[in-house]
Each structure stands twice: as structure tokens, then as C-alpha cells.
Image: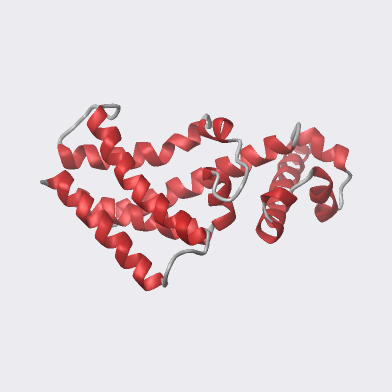
């Protein structure tokens, strides 16, 4: 039994090493540079071994995006937990979203197709891709007294907020933004304004 456990542990370590190497390549050279051969070179394995874990490059891309959404969800939950009032929770979560985007630029680009060819349909079909929606709409619903998370008003409010934040993030990822202080003030003003309309 111990040897079986050890084999499983080694397999999981190899899988993690492959993903870590892939993310390292993406961070240093961009998504377009990612290939099975490059990953193999980084971890000093042969390419066929990598295919034992991932059927192709797209499978690795999907796994990295899944990881990105899990990290983002964790950050959103942590931000929410620091406040009691829904309006404050919403502000904190969108600020956490902003922070995540710039702390994990390459992951964010892959998750949302910013400056990269994104397999958007496959990424959008990841169950983890729904996590930001689930976490944030729960608070919007609490603020508005709505329980139907799929209602038209819920979609409108969520996408209004997301469009503002994602748009500002994208402008800055394309290096067309201004200083961080101004960006954060724009973010705060925009989110605060939208929250006031929800509260109103």
C-alpha cells in the first residue's frame, strides 16, 4: 500500500511540475510561446511523458485557467469575509479582483483572452469560471433583496460592474492606462457609483 501511495504522490508531483513549468514559460515568454517541448525542456523530461498527463497543449491551458479561477475565487471570498455590510463587501471584492489581475497578469490574460488567443468557449465552460459570478451575485442579491441569481436585473448589475473593472484592467494590461493611484481612484469611483445605484 505504501508503494502505491508513493506512486500516486509522485504522479501528482509530476503533474504539478508540468503546470508550474508551463506557467513559468507563459510568465516569461507569453502564452504563444507555450509548447509541450518547451515544458519538457524546463522540467528535463521527454515530451512523451508530458502527454501521459495532458493530452495536448490546450489541456494544459485549460488547467492553468482553472487554477486562475480558483485563486481568484479564494481572493474574492477573503475580501468578502473582511466586511459585514454587502456594499463594503462588493467594493472589497472588486478591489481584490483588480489586485488579482495585476498580481497574475499572464493568468488573467489567458482566463479572459486579453492580448492572447483564448480558447474562450472551452474556458467559459469550466465550472470554475462561474465562481466569480456565484460569489459576487450572492452579495448583489443581498444588497438588492433578490434571490433569483439568474434574473435579468442581476445579470445587468453584475455585467455593469464587471465591464467597468475588466475594461479598466484590460486598458492597463495593454499599457494604455495612467498611474496606479489614478487607476485605483477611477476604480473606486466607478464601483462606488454603481453600488449607489444598486442601493438606491
Asked if residue 157 lies left or right of residue 37, the reply is: left
The picture quadrant where one finds residue 49 is top right
Asked if residue 116 lies left or right of residue 16, the reply is: left
Q: Quadrant of the N terminus?
A: top right
- Count all numbered tags in the image, as a single digit: 0
Please tell me which residue is depicted at 67% across the width and 50% down the height of the picture: 31
The picture quadrant where one finds residue 179 is bottom left
Spot occupied by residue 93 in the image (x, y as percentages of width and height): 34, 52
**What residue occupies the far front of the structure in this picture?**
176
For the question of whether residue 1 can be seen, the reply is no
Spot occupied by residue 125 in the image (x, y as percentages of width and height): 52, 29
Spot occupied by residue 67 in the image (x, y as percentages of width and height): 56, 44
Asked if residue 76 lies left or right of residue 19, the reply is: left
The picture quadrant where one finds residue 3 is top right
In this view of the protein, which residue sits in the foreground, 121 or 87? 121
For the question of whether residue 192 can be seen, the reply is yes
Amino acid at each position: 500500500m505504501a508503494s502505491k501511495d508513493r506512486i500516486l504522490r509522485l504522479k501528482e508531483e509530476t503533474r504539478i511540475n508540468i503546470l508550474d513549468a508551463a506557467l513559468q514559460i507563459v510568465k516569461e515568454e507569453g502564452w504563444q510561446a507555450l509548447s509541450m517541448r518547451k515544458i519538457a525542456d524546463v522540467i528535463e523530461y521527454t515530451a512523451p511523458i508530458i502527454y501521459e498527463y495532458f493530452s495536448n497543449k490546450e489541456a494544459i491551458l485549460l488547467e492553468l485557467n482553472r487554477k486562475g479561477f480558483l485563486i481568484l475565487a479564494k481572493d474574492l471570498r477573503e475580501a468578502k469575509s473582511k466586511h459585514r455590510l454587502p456594499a463594503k463587501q462588493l467594493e472589497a471584492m472588486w478591489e481584490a479582483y483588480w489586485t488579482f489581475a495585476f498580481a497574475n497578469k499572464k493568468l488573467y490574460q489567458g482566463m479572459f483572452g486579453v492580448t492572447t488567443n483564448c480558447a474562450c468557449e472551452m474556458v467559459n465552460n469550466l465550472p470554475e469560471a462561474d465562481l466569480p459570478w456565484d460569489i459576487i451575485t450572492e452579495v448583489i442579491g443581498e444588497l438588492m433583496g433578490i434571490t433569483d441569481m439568474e434574473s435579468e436585473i442581476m445579470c445587468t448589475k453584475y455585467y455593469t460592474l464587471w465591464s467597468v473593472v475588466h475594461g479598466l484592467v484590460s486598458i492597463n494590461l495593454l499599457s494604455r492606462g495612467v498611474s496606479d493611484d489614478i487607476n485605483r481612484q477611477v476604480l473606486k469611483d466607478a464601483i462606488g457609483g454603481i453600488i449607489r445605484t444598486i442601493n438606491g
